[in-house]
């Protein structure tokens, strides 16, 4: 999940765009560890994860 958030930041992607990119871009899959056969988390999952980082003041630090 964390590596996905990094990609989202680096490429200025919305949550929906991140899900789409993880579904079709092999380089994104390889970086994050997702396989072609894996189910990619939905956009709300990434949003909740990012919000937990923010709540714990880890978003800027990491």
Image: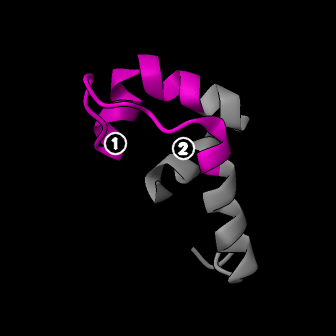
| Residue 62 position within the rendered picture, expressed as x and y whole percent measured from the top left | 57, 73
The residue that appears at 62% across and 43% down in the rendered structure is: 8
Residue interval drawn in magenta: 19-46
Q: Earlier in the sequence, mark 2 or mark 1?
A: 2
Q: Which residue, given by chain and number where applicable, does mark 1 sit on?
A: 31
Q: Is 25 positioned to the left or the right of 55 in the image?
A: left
Q: Observer-nearest residue: 28 or 41? A: 41
* Image height of 28 relative to 55, above or below: above
Q: Which quadrant of the view contains residue 56?
A: bottom right
Local crowd at mark 1 within 10 Å, few (<14), some, or many (≥20)?
few
Q: Position of residue 31 (x, y in %)?
A: 34, 42
Residue at figure coordinates x 55%, y 52% from the top left: 6
Tell which of 37 and 31 is nearer to you.
Answer: 37
Q: Is residue 2 above or below residue 24?
A: below
Residue 21 included in the magenta stretch of the image: yes
Identify the mark at residue 53; answer none if there is no mark.
none
Helix, strand or loop status at disc 2: helix
Q: Quadrant of residue 43?
A: top right
Task: From the image, tell me which residue sits under label 2.
Answer: 7
Instruction: Give the main secondary structure of the magenta stretch.
Output: helix
Q: Is residue 47 left or right of residue 38?
A: right
Label 1 near label 2: C-beta < 8 Å? Answer: yes
21 sits to left or right of 60: left
């Amino acid at each position: 999940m964390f590596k996905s958030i990094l990609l989202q930041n680096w490429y200025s992607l919305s949550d929906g765009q991140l899900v789409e990119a993880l579904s079709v871009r092999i380089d994104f899959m390889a970086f994050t560890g997702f396989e072609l056969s894996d189910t990619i988390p939905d956009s709300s999952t990434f949003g909740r994860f990012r919000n937990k980082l923010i709540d714990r003041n880890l978003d800027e630090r990491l």
